[in-house]
Amino acid sequence: MIKRTLENFLLEDLKHFPAVGLLGPRQVGKTTLAKMLSSAVTPTIYMDLELETDLYRLQNAQLFLKQYADSLVIIDEIQRKPDLFPLLRALSDQTPDINGRFLILGSASPDLIKGASESLAGRIFYRELHPFSLFEVKNTKDAQSQLWLRGGYPDSFLAQDLAQSIKWREGFIRTYLERDIPQLGFSIPASQVRRFWTMLAHVNGQVLNASQLATSMGISSPTIRRYIDLLSDTFVIRQLQPWYANIKKRLVKSPKIYLKDTGLLHRLVQIDSFDALHAHPALGASWEGFCIEQILAVLPFTVQSFYFRTATGNEVDLVLTDLDNRGPVCVEFKYSLTPRVSKGFYISMEDMGAARGYVVYPGDEIIPLPGNVSVYPLRKFIEDCILSL
């Protein structure tokens, strides 16, 4: 059993909020984590809304849940029964001095679950469970490489061999397309969504060009954006928004798109080994996306993430800003043991007023560069520069 770093945060959240939401994609480990929490918080009752027996228990949800006013009620796959949200709000209001009454697990964002974002406003704190991070697996080069190639979904990462990992990821993709999306009320052909998802995999790490995708798919730009939001709200892609402020330059204002799990990225573009990855044009973007997700998985919620790009092509892969207004931190990702920093990176730092710049690479040493820029290994960068924010 791999201990998840989010466990202690959730236990603390339950002390301060009537309800806590644990969100994330299917099969990422939400149920396992919730059951681990139940051993630390007693008494506890667990319900899985994918089971007909548990749905039956909630036929009269108000009467059923009232008898567990002194227990932590864990409700899994909450998106199957969104009409519960107003009731959870009412029950929370009846005991305003009692926190930790409900832990709800969901595979879709509150904005996608009808009523979720309004009903429990001010009464719930949400956490997102990401796939495995570097700090949840062994601190070895082999473990980091396996995490990058297979991705961080537990059944994929822990598969007995690469063939089983590939088989699991293919099954996950099919289940997501054929069951999960329809359950959320979207009647979209699975083959069309898979084709779109695969196209996004081939432009992973690039700025969204909805018109170009619409032309390739033979559908409208608004439909493209609806598909983008659906994949984003079900936690399989990330829309990294552009950073902009009052500077006298034309800036790119469309998001960059990343597949959040590199294992799924590699399956969609038919990369099934490290040799294939190193020979593939997606290598650099895969490394960039992997690093970004590892960083954002542990980023304090007070820190926001963006990218920066001007119309003339000067850019920064990742920009981090915090609420203390200490100025943006600029991060570039290079899959090279001898990474070079472009002139555009320094110009971008100057444009943004950034005092610090970093390059994250697959090497082992910290290398200082001119202009207050340093080259860091990924794990060391997170330990020294991210966890201290």
Image (tube, rainbow, N blue to C red):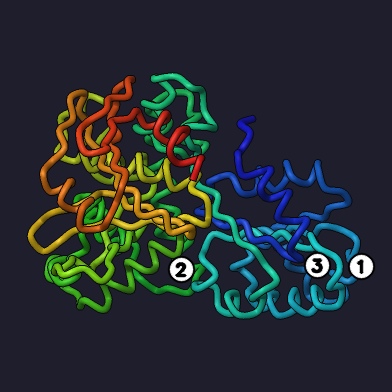
Near mark 2 (Cα within 10 A), the count class, few <14, some 14-19 or many ≥20, is some
Marks 1 and 2, how far apart at CA: 34 Å
Q: Position of residue 87 (x, y in %)?
A: 75, 78
Labels 1, 3: front one:
1
Regarding mark 3 in the picture, which secondary structure is present there?
A: helix
Whether residue 300 is situated above or below residue 370 in the rendered picture: below
Residue 161 in view (yes/no): yes
Residue 60 in view (yes/no): no
Kind of residue at badge 1: Gln
Near mark 1 (Cα within 10 A), the count class, few <14, some 14-19 or many ≥20, is few
Disc on the earlier residue, 2 or 3 = 3
Disc on the earlier residue, 1 or 3 = 3
Kind of residue at badge 2: Pro
Q: Position of residue 382 (x, y in %)?
A: 44, 36
Indicate which disc residue 57 carries.
Answer: 3
- Taking depth in this image into account, of 345 and 192 the one nearest to the observer is 345
Query: What residue is disc 1 on?
Result: 67
